[in-house]
Image: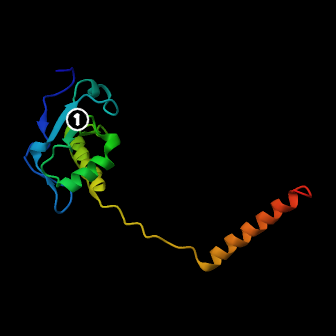
Amino acid sequence: MPRGVRPTARADDRGRSVRVTPSIVIAPAELTLSFVRASGPGGQNVNKVASKAVLRFNVRDSPSLPPELRARALARLASRLTTAGELILTSAVHREQARNRAAVLARFRTVLANALRAPRPRRPTQPSPAARERRLTEKRRQGERKRERRAPGE
């Protein structure tokens, strides 16, 4: 085990599930939370305490996500996933391990909920008749300008 990495614990030591949306709940067994030494606030304490929280969630193999939502999450989070399909989030903003755990779980809920949200359907629009007329008038004006630049007899 690398220096500064504490043994892995489940996402919530109290065994609570993580509710992402009203219909989607992630079981604690699917989340892996580990703690490592972090840089940042804490002074000399930083060198002794593993307070940075690292959360891992395998999006590709998650039984909690229905297939269509899993596909949407994989597509939306593609740049943030490992080759094994794992989403890795960290939090080292606080000096205490418990606050970093809460922060990384809150961030996980936000990131996953945004990835699962259905995209707004695009409503096709049409230019107004006045806009069409302005475009055609400008085209005629531009064509006339180019015609006037030609040498006589072309």
- In the image, taking residue 154 as reference, residue 15 lies left or right, namely left
> Which of the 4 image quadrants contains residue 129?
bottom right
The residue nearer to you, when weighing 115 against 146, is 146
Of the 4 image quadrants, the one containing the C terminus is bottom right
Position above or below: 135 against 18: below
Instruction: Check disc 1 and report its element: helix, strand or loop.
Output: loop
According to the picture, the residue beneath numbered tag 1 turns out to be 84
Using the rendered view, name the quadrant where residue 130 is placed: bottom right
Q: Nearer the viewer, residue 127 or 74?
A: 127
Colouring scheme applied when the structure was drawn: rainbow
Q: Position of residue 135 (x, y in %)?
A: 67, 70
Instruction: Between residue 64 and residue 71, name the one nearer to us.
Output: 71
Image position of 2 (left or right of 147):
left
What crowding class fits label 1: few (fewer than 14 Cα within 10 Å), some (14-19), or many (20 or more)?
Answer: few
Q: Nearer the viewer, residue 36 or 139?
A: 139
Rendered residue at 67%/76% (across/down): 133
Q: Is residue 122 above or below residue 153?
A: below
Answer with the quarter of the image where residue 23 lies: bottom left
Q: Amino acid at mark 1?
A: Ala
Q: What residue appears at the point 18 percent right and 34 percent down from the top-left corner?
A: 34
Q: Which residue reaches farthest bottom? A: 129
Residue projecting furthest to the right:
152
